[in-house]
Image (cartoon, grey):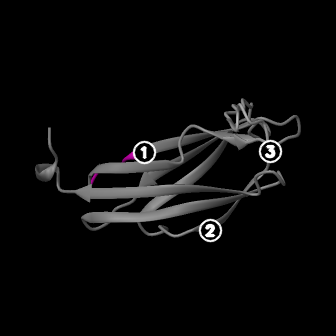
Amino acid sequence: MVHTNDPQKKVQSLSIKAFVKTSISLSANSVSLIGDSKKKITNSVTIIAKEDKPLELKPSDFNLEEKVAYRIEEVEAGKVFKIHFTSMPSPEGTYFGFLKLKTNYPEKPEINIKVKAKYQKASQLKG
């Protein structure tokens, strides 16, 4: 709403449309690994560079080292990456954490992927 000095239209509504260009696209901001604590569970996040210059990813922080493993796969050089998360043998329970990746894009210097791992006995899983 805009207030004007026009005596007949003191308040006007404005609408703005914009296209927001993202430099990096993620298939998801988080990943869940839910299942049998004795079986490997894998889930992935795809990262796509939207700029003309090649994207570089470097892990900077990961806080679930003993519960979850991750692997960075470069699907298309400098353009498309898959981050694969896999459960590790762990006690039953629910674990929350994150993987932080540094990028070479000043527009998006860091990517943070949230990770949830919920490991149960096979008999506790709902079928």
Q: Secondary structure at mark 2?
A: strand
Q: Position of residue 112 (x, y in %)?
A: 60, 57
Q: Main secondary structure of the magenta part?
A: loop
Disc 1 target residue: 42
Task: Assign the C terminus to one quadrant of the image.
Answer: top left
Disc 3 target residue: 55
Instruction: Return the disc, 1 or 3, that comes first in the chain's sequence.
Output: 1
Instruction: Return the disc, 1 or 2, that comes first in the chain's sequence.
Output: 1
In the rendered structure, which segment of residues is drawn in magenta? 38-42
Alpha-carbon neighbours of circle 2 within 10 Å: few (<14), some, or many (≥20)? few
Of badges 1 and 2, the one in the foreground is 2
Q: Is residue 37 visible?
A: no
Alpha-carbon neighbours of circle 3 within 10 Å: few (<14), some, or many (≥20)? many
Q: Quadrant of residue 22?
A: top right
- Tag on residue 72? none
Residue found 74% across the figure and 36% down from its top:
7
Q: How far, Cα to Cα, is label 3 from label 2?
A: 18 Å
Name the kind of residue labelled 3 in the image: Leu
Question: Farthest residue toward the front?
Answer: 7
Of badges 1 and 3, the one in the foreground is 3
Name the kind of residue labelled 2 in the image: Asp
Query: Which residue is at the front of the view, 51 or 10?
Result: 10
Q: Position of residue 80 (x, y in %)?
A: 70, 36
Q: Quadrant of residue 116?
A: bottom left
Q: Position of residue 26 (x, y in %)?
A: 61, 41
Residues tagged 1 and 3 counted as in contact (Cβ below 8 A): no
- Tag on residue 61? 2
